[in-house]
């Protein structure tokens, strides 16, 4: 309980309901200020066995604790009394909540029974569900049973709207009954998706997938033109054959023109690669690649919608989905993990973060002086390849940057913060700056270093580092006041010829 707070404050996004973006700042007694990125409601289970709903709670992710404003309770018609080292909130004759005084603070006591423990477990499962690209409950169970998520006690998931919006059911393809090949590169499935209505950050409108049949690992390459498939396959072939010291024996695809060009057919013949092509208008015969593209699109769409990112980030979402699929259980290979089957060693998931979350990337020393901020606010959009880092979107410079020196805030997403900054020029500002009495710097969450990425992406992206020009905003022209002459005007004399 805080008598100096102007409004309720919560630091955990998962506890909030009816959440909506909010733009403002809060100032503390030591003149330190923090950003308010949202507003919503919070339900508390009290020791009285009742549920206490706090309305219009501000979301400040960088705060360590939750604060209940006595002033806001008074405005809502509640009566708050203090005495005998106790406090009590009533409304009329109804006791809503009560608690004890601990030291100099009046603490809110909420129940810690099994029900609240289950809520905490659900929050953990929800966080990992988001980190692994909106994976299913069965997939969560498989990863937990393999010891990949040691802090996951319950894989039960609540209703996930991005999953519903991003994953649409289609008629299931008829299973062929064939088992995966036992040797890597013995059979490669491939399929092209596109064109998309919106170009990616790098200008791509297509992507091509290559799936190893024995491990079900997937590689994704992004293309500006469909005719680039042949050159992309040669790059893929050189990469995987150099990594495994094995040769691609068979390539299975549909009957599209990108796979039927003379140079493609002749190249495969020279390399001893057998080409299997499906019958026209029969995508079921290329079911492995078709299903993989469907899964990629569903997972990518769910992640992008959850983060609130614009459609131009579709390629980054697909890239991340491929990276996560390679590190999740695959049913065709007995729920083993494709990346582990491909590399022959275990992979770690400790470096995974929520796609689209707010991230604070360290600014290069050469670009900052001693008085400037040491980090810039960005959006996490992808895992790096061999550079042991992450990729971020800088919303101000409109560029993709790479870094491993970063602090993640997985409780805040693009839609909570940077989306509001992008549109605030078009909307009236709604900022408030208030003082929280008695708050010090110790009450503010300190940055926590992220784990170093230990795995390597199996997907290969397109031009992720390509920047785009920032749109120039239009402004209304100022009204000019023209000074008029006070001279009396007379018509000119007209003379006849």
Image (cartoon, helix red, strand yellow):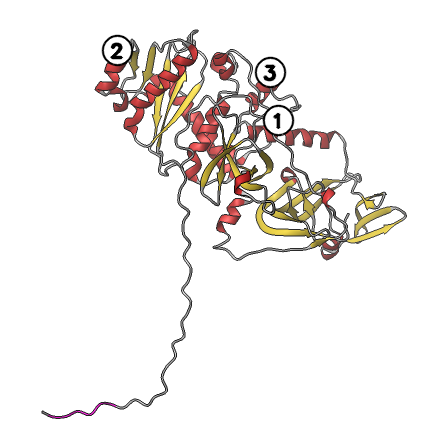
Does 415 sit left or right of 297 as displayed?
A: right
**At 67% from the left edge and 41% from the top edge, which residue is drawn?**
11
Label 1 secondary element: loop
| Badge 2 vs badge 1, beta-carbon distance below 8 Å | no
**At 56% from the left edge and 25% from the top edge, which residue is drawn?**
453
The alpha-carbon separation of the residues under discs 2 and 3 comes to: 43 Å
Q: Which residues are magenta?
A: 491-496
The alpha-carbon separation of the residues under discs 1 and 3 comes to: 17 Å
Give the image location of residue 413, x and y in percent. 55, 39
Quarter of the image that includes the C terminus: bottom left
Q: Which secondary structure type mostly characterizes the magenta part of the structure?
A: loop
Query: Is residue 164 shown to the viewer in this render?
Result: no
Viewer-nearest of labels 2 and 1?
Answer: 2
Give the mark nearer the N terminus: 2 vs 1. Answer: 1
Give the image location of residue 50, x and y in percent. 75, 41
Label 2 secondary element: helix
Q: Which residue is mark 2?
A: 270
Residue at the outermost right position:
84
Query: Is residue 215 shown to the viewer in this render?
Result: yes
Q: Which residue is mark 3?
A: 146
Q: Quadrant of residue 350?
A: top right
Label at residue 120: none
The alpha-carbon separation of the residues under discs 2 and 1 comes to: 52 Å
Q: Which residue is mark 1?
A: 156
């Amino acid at each position: 309980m805080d008598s100096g707070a102007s409004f309720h404050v919560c630091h955990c996004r998962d506890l909030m309901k009816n959440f909506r973006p909010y733009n403002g700042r809060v100032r503390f007694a030591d003149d330190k200020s923090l950003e308010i990125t949202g507003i919503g409601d919070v339900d508390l289970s009290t020791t009285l066995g009742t549920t206490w709903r706090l309305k219009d709670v501000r979301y400040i992710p960088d705060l360590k604790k939750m604060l209940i404003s006595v002033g806001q309770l008074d405005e809502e018609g509640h009566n708050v009394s203090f005495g005998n080292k106790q406090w009590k909130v009533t409304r009329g004759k109804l006791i809503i909540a009560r608690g004890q005084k601990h030291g100099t603070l009046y603490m809110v006591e909420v129940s810690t029974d099994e029900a609240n423990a289950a809520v905490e477990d659900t929050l953990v499962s929800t966080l990992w569900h988001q980190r692994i690209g909106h994976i299913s409950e069965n997939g969560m169970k498989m990863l937990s049973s393999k010891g990949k998520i040691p802090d996951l006690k319950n894989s039960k998931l609540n209703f996930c709207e991005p999953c519903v919006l991003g994953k649409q059911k289609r008629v299931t393809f008829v299973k062929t009954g064939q088992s995966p090949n036992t040797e890597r590169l013995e059979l490669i499935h491939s399929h092209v998706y596109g064109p998309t209505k919106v170009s990616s950050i790098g200008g791509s409108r297509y992507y091509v997938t290559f799936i190893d049949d024995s491990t079900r690992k997937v590689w994704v390459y992004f293309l500006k033109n469909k005719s680039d498939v042949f050159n992309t396959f040669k790059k893929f072939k050189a990469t995987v054959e150099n990594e495994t010291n094995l040769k691609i024996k068979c390539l299975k695809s549909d009957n599209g023109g990108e796979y039927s060009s003379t140079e493609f057919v002749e190249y495969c013949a020279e390399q001893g690669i057998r080409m299997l092509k499906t019958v026209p208008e029969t995508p079921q015969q290329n079911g492995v690649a078709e299903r993989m593209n469907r899964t990629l699109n569903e997972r990518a769409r769910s992640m992008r919608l959850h983060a609130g990112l614009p459609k131009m980030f579709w390629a980054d979402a697909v890239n991340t989905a491929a990276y996560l699929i390679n590190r999740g259980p695959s049913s065709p290979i007995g729920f083993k993990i494709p990346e582990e089957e491909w590399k022959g060693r275990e992979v770690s998931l400790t470096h995974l973060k929520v796609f689209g979350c707010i991230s604070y990337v360290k600014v290069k020393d050469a670009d900052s002086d001693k008085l400037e901020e040491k980090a810039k606010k960005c959006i996490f959009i992808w895992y790096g390849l061999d550079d042991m880092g992450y990729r971020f979107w800088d919303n101000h410079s409109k560029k993709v940057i790479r870094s491993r020196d970063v602090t993640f805030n997985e409780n805040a997403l693009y839609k909570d913060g940077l989306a509001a900054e992008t549109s605030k020029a078009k909307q009236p500002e709604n900022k408030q700056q208030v003082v929280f009495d008695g708050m010090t710097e110790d009450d503010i969450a300190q940055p926590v270093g992220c784990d170093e990425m230990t795995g390597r992406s199996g997907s290969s992206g397109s031009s992720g580092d390509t920047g785009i020009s920032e749109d120039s905003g239009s402004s209304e022209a100022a009204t000019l006041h023209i000074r008029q002459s006070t001279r009396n005007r007379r018509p000119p004399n007209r003379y006849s010829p």
